[in-house]
Amino acid sequence: MNNKNYCKIYCSPHIHSSETTGKIMLYVIISLLPALIGSVYFFGIYAFKVIITSVFSCFLSEFLFQILMKKEIRIFDGSAVVTGILLAFVLPPRIPLWITAIGGFLAIFLVKELFGGIGFNIFNPALTARAILLASYPVEMTKFINPLDYRIDAITSPTPLFIIKENLTQKLPSLWQMFIGNRPGCIGETSTVLLLIGGFFLLYKNVITWHIPITYILTVSILSLVFKQNVFYQIMGGGLILGAFFMATDYVTSPITKRGKIIFGIGCGVITFLIRKAGGYPEGVCYSILFMNSLVPLINRYTLPKKFGSRK
Amino acid sequence: MFKGGVKLVDFKNLSKNEPIEEFKYPEKVIIPLSQPTGSPAKPLVKKGDNVVEGQVIGEITGFISSYIHSSVSGKVVDILPWNLPTNRKSLSIIIESDGEKKQIEQIKRDWIKLESNEIINIVREAGIVGLGGAAFPTHVKLTIPQGKKAEFILINGCECEPFLTCDYRVLKEYTDEIIEGIQIICKATNVKKVFIGIERNKIDLLPYINEAIKNLKIFIEIEVKILPERYPQGSEKHLIKSILNKEVSSGGLPIDVGCIVFNIQTTLAIKRAVCDGIPLTERVLTCTGLVENPKNLKVKIGTLISEILNYCKGDIKYGRKIVIGGPMMGIQIPNPEVPVIKGTTGILLLPQESLPENIQPCIRCGKCVNICPMYLAPSEIGRYVEAEKYEKCENLNVFDCIECGCCSYICPAKRPLVDFIKCAKVKLRKK
């Protein structure tokens, strides 16, 4: 009874929610599974190899970095796995595995760990890695194929947005084919329905809030209507769904307040549309999110809530 | 309704149906002269003096200060510094009981004939403080400052902290006395409108209250507000926001928006002091958690917490911790050999949680910002504290934090955000 040091003294509160960083990452991984399975169906076992390579490369890079820099080993929180899957999702289906491995290394080493590890990176690791790869290996990074063509040297085929952008004579896939994901594109971005299942799962589990995805997609839709583009092709033809639900909502690189998230979503939408319509690329999701990432500290500063009692 | 806050599992069923039980007359009490808020009292007795229950043993030393009474009859054996359940130390009067249970003469009064200042004086002399935890002297609250006007009295029966059920039991078992206490408060402050705020999980009290307010002695209006179960509903500022939809500004008092808030047990203590002449020498608290027999106990101030835990069969072993107050804002004590003080609302025996050894990095999910009931940004404050940039915390209004614990509770990285905020407050005050 009088044993004074029977346990450690903690500050209040003495109860905590069951939510942990690891659990959130697990939810994100689960939410990506439908699209992952879909991608293997559409682009064959090679797509799976790309995903595995990417995850393994990310995991290993983080592990080695933390050992070399004598930091706390945090790889088991699952964030490297999430980055790995997301990176693979934004690579073309027949990307050489060694480029994938370089991408994973860049994402973790350059973008995440050098900035201080989880919670401190400014830019989305997967998207930054993709941007670097696109600049370094433009040929390999733009080689898209027809889905359900499982050959390793499958025939290349332009993405719907490329067809629209360049006014090609090629036939566009039907809306239904695009909805289920049967169209050329990056590994994980093609299937709108499977990505939505994952996205709604995250919303249901309160991992993400509606603010970024809805404002992002809505902004692109409204701008498409105003500038007389086909709204459905703009939404489903590129990486918008993947970007809006899984990339732009990345905790670390998006604003922390609800108002900030709305501004962030609108900003992403505007820039995406500007790149698609007026820029040199057919797709703008990646760069728009990266651009908005750089504005996050500023958005946070100006959207922090006013303290209780400051309005009557 | 206020914005933010968290929904908690309340665990109130453990002790909700346990009627208030009188705890045994203690053999020894330790009565600290400094019970949380205000300047400490000056001892009026010395070693060897005989005292009776209800006798004044500590004198007021300022406006915000309160009288201290002996809670037993017996002999003062020592006056020395003793640990408080707040992990501070205070000069305390140690009284050994003689078992005779002698009491001071209790003056019965008819409160209707009393003037406002007479009531306030009785409350002051009875040593009544807010019994919801903060222990702010009640006579200070009843004294309305010049130029201010009180329009509403709010009775706080929310008890939003999980586990605690003492206020619920008091409101259920002493409903008539509490309604009488409310009328006394109204008389003292000249207010005509009263709201009783209770959380939805106490909705079964409604018939008791409705029955009791049928025969009021003075003309006032009492309205019961059923509020959603959302922590920290029982925080003074948030109760006002929920009931009156008014926000008390930073550093302001409820009287700024024309209301005064009283806890259930404080109201009961006022009634007993004014009508029956009983000073504040005992309170009802809940002893629950991992104890074998959770109970609501009426305990003499100064009783040792170890004795209460023993009585409720609380086995203090490795992996368990003792928390005084609720689990969200309570204080963990290393040693149960400390006395019950006026602000002790509960004694909890809780399991030790498995929290990360090192402080994990913030993943910037923004959950703490969204749920902060004071609309602050705990994550940002935490980051600045880690970087030891305390002056930045001041810009983020760290002093407005009520330390309710919502942010630490919700944080997925289990960051000790409340610790950070407390640290920032201490460092900034030192400057």
Image (spheres, coloured by chain):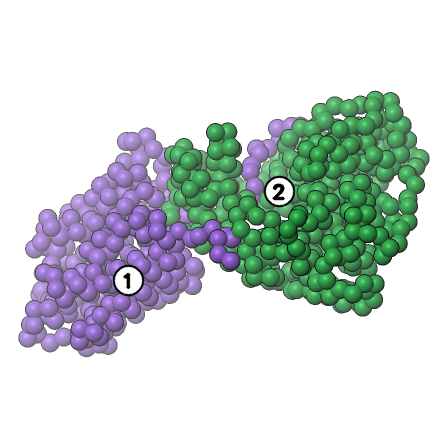
Q: Is residue B292 visible?
A: no
Q: Which chain is green?
A: B
Which residue is disc 1 drawn over?
Answer: A266
Q: Nearer the viewer, residue B280 or B11?
A: B280
**Image point (64%, 51%), residue name:** B147
Residue most toward the left?
A169
Secondary structure, mark 1, is helix
Residue B379 tag number: none
Specify the subunit that label 2 lies on: B
Q: Position of residue A200 (x, y in %)?
A: 37, 65
Specify the subunit that label 1 lies on: A
**Mark 1 belongs to which amino acid?**
Ile
Which residue is disc 2 drawn over?
Answer: B330
Badge 1: few (under 14), some or many (20 or more) residues near its Cα, within 10 Å?
many
Q: CA distance from mark 2 to mark 1?
A: 43 Å
Q: Position of residue B429 (x, y in %)?
A: 51, 32
Badge 2: few (under 14), some or many (20 or more) residues near its Cα, within 10 Å?
many
